[in-house]
Amino acid sequence: MAAGWAIHGITLQDYNGDILQASDLSAVAKLFGFETVALHRSALQRVLSEQLPSDVIRFGTEVKSLSQSTDAVSALLTDGSSIHAKIVVGADGLHSQIRSMASLGGTLRYSGSSSYRAMAKGANLLPPELDHDAYEIWGKGCRLGFSKIGTDGYYWYMTFDSEQGKSFSPTERQAHAESLFREFFPKWITLLENTPSEAILQTDISDLKSLQSWSRDRIGLIGDAAHATTPNLGQGGAMAVEDAYALTNAVEEVGLNGDAFKLYEKRRREKVNWTVSTSWSIGRMCHMKNPVLRSLRNLAVRKMFRGGGEKQIRKLYSIG
């Protein structure tokens, strides 16, 4: 909690100012006993790693190959060393090498959109009454989202229609982002003005088609390696943490073996499938350019979330 920034409300808007959804998160805070927290991925990794003994994490090497026996897994690393374990958990993301080594498949599905992500530095770049609110604004063929994530910085992202694999230089990214800010999001351009061009990261937005299984014997997957989702619900990192919790519970019940992976997957599949499909659907509707279709979409979104925004968030907060 201390590493991040509390978010009290979430607002979804059309770029013309129409509010499509406004969620007060106080009810969620009361129900679950803690607030929604925005924090940088590196801050989350630091907080988690600080809970571990100093010699647990090994840097500077990768898994080269895996082999299984009836009661163990051996991992050969690229530095020439090897590790023998009861199970191996692949938490290596959308392009998981562990998933490939375990022959679990994995077909990427491109969303049709690329994205920019960055941190804007400054304590008071936006009005103070917005300090604890997260915003997402839908434009034509693009959108902008942002929230404060600490006392001196704001995280922002921008998605835009693009062919897959089309990358831009830092200067081109900043120029392109500026053109979209000025056309659709001029009120928030201060975010871009306080972001160095080299700090803007570009990532194509894809998810993973559903795998038949998240494990093979004693090798299993969590997070994006198992079920990568588009970021439209902000649940990628969150689902990985939930997976780790669910897998830990399964291991405590049945031991360090393949049965733990099966039990964990059984408990997580429904929640994960709902999150991935819902996020994909949101991504398909948010970039509409036709004004008539956008008006119909806005009406549908308002109806969908009328009095139900908190209900959707409660669903996201469940583990299974």
Image (cartoon, grey):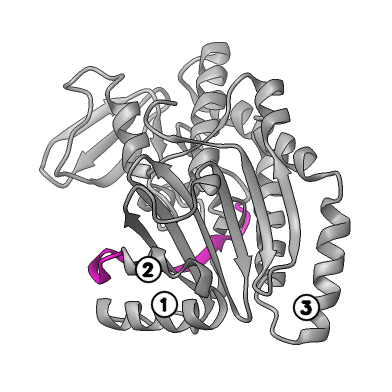
Q: Which residue does the numbered mark 1 point to in the structure image? A: 177
Residue shown at the point (39%, 56%) measured from the top left:
125
Q: Looking at this view, name the residue that lies furthest to the top.
A: 253
| Amino acid of disc 2 | Leu
Counting residues from the start of the chain, the first of labels 1 and 2 encountered is: 1
Rendered location of residue 10, percent (x, y): 64, 48
Q: Where is residue 204 in the image (x, y as percent from the top left)?
A: 45, 70
Q: Which stretch appears magenta?
A: 195-211
Viewer-closest of 200 and 204? 200
User: Is 32 on the left-hand or right-hand side of 6?
Assistant: right
In the picture shown, does residue 52 fall above or below 81?
above
Badge nearest the viewer, 3 or 2: 2
Q: Name the residue under label 2.
A: 192
Check disc 2 and report its element: helix, strand or loop. Answer: helix
Secondary structure state at the residue bearing disc 3:
helix
Callout 1 amino acid: Ala
| Discs 1/2, front | 2
Query: Is 123 left or right of 251, judged from the image as shown?
Result: left
Q: Which of 7 and 66 is in front in this view?
A: 7
Residue 87 sits above or below residue 195 on the image:
above
Q: Name the residue under label 3.
A: 294
Residue 235 can be seen, yes or no: no
The image shows residue 145, relative to residue 275, as above or below, that is: below
Percent position of residue 186, x then y: 51, 75
* Dot 3 alpha-carbon crowd within 10 angstroms: few under 14, some 14 to 19, many 20 or more: some
Residue at the (65%, 76%) spot, across then down = 287
Quarter of the image containing the N terminus? top left
